[in-house]
Image (tube, coloured by chain):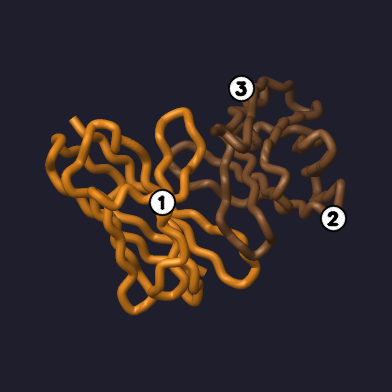
Chain colours: A brown, B orange
């Protein structure tokens, strides 16, 4: 039972354009969402998060949008840079502070120079 | 600040053998996690420690997997005996009060 789904295994975007990565979830108890970025041979690194009381959170070039009614969140990267090429994982937890994360399967983002 | 340290980076064993992985979390982080990441999937939580106590081990296959965190600092994860389906990357992570999990580079296990 995949509670967090990333339906696009890969995405290619031109440098300078917007990258949009999508994530869907099924568990309505999830109320805290995170995005992690992973380079080859490294562990995932935290990128940005959002709690269910918000519908948008922004940090520099990265913005996460949450649509609770659709159980959908997205990560926008503007403008995309070659260093953004990585695998991006969406993760969710029940009750901020519970700490148990459920991860999606990841989307491989390739930025084309 | 040093990150989460894991060793070894790679391990190749034959099925039915045993293997152990080691993790040293970020200094001061009370919570430590072990994840299993099978190729093409996201990380799956195996066990969570708070200091040296187990918080959640509901997804740990206890017939073959064991983990300990003596003295509430570093931790070991053991598999005995290993099966082919245990081939994966084993990730260790730690967190403090901000609840952000910081991951190590992982140990890639191949079971032949």
Query: Which numbered marker is on residue A37?
Result: none
Compared across the picture, whether B26 is left or right of B106 comes to right
User: Label 1's element?
Assistant: strand
Compared across the picture, whether B62 is left or right of B38 comes to left
Chain letter belonging to callout 2: A
Compared across the picture, whether B9 is left or right of A81 comes to left
How crowded pointer 3 is (Cα within 10 Å; few <14, some 14-19, many 20+) is rated as: some
Point 18% across, 30% down: residue? B112
Disc 3 target residue: A10
Pick the front one: A106 or B26: A106
Pick the front one: A60 or A51: A51
Q: Position of residue B8 (x, y in %)?
A: 27, 51
Disc 1 target residue: B46
Q: Give the quadrant of residue B68.
A: bottom left
Query: Which numbered marker is on residue A53?
Result: 2
Point 24% across, 49% down: residue? B63
How crowded pointer 1 is (Cα within 10 Å; few <14, some 14-19, many 20+) is rated as: many
- How far is mark 3 from mark 2, CA to CA? 30 Å
User: Label 2's element?
Assistant: loop
User: Label 3's element?
Assistant: strand
Total count of labels: 3
Point 72% across, 31% down: residue? A22
């Amino acid at each position: 039972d995949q509670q967090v789904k990333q339906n696009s295994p890969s995405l290619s975007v031109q440098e300078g354009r917007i990258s949009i990565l999508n994530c869907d979830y099924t568990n309505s108890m999830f109320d805290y969402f995170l995005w992690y970025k992973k380079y080859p041979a490294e562990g995932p690194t935290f990128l940005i998060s959002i709690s269910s009381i918000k519908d948008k959170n922004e940090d520099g070039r990265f913005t996460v949008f949450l649509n609770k009614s659709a159980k959908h969140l997205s990560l926008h990267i503007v403008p995309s840079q070659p260093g953004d090429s990585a695998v991006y994982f969406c993760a969710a937890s029940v009750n901020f502070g519970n700490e148990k994360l459920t991860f999606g399967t990841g989307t491989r983002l390739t930025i084309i120079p | 600040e040093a990150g989460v340290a894991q060793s070894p980076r790679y391990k190749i064993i034959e099925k039915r053998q045993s293997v152990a992985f080691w993790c040293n979390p970020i200094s001061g982080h009370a919570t430590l996690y072990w994840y299993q990441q099978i190729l093409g999937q996201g990380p799956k939580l195996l066990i969570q420690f708070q200091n040296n106590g187990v918080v959640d081990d509901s997804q740990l296959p206890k017939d073959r997997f064991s983990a300990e965190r003596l003295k509430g600092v570093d931790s070991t994860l053991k598999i005995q005996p290993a099966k082919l389906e245990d081939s994966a990357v084993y990730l260790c992570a730690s967190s403090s009060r901000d609840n952000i999990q910081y991951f190590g580079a992982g140990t890639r296990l191949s079971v032949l």
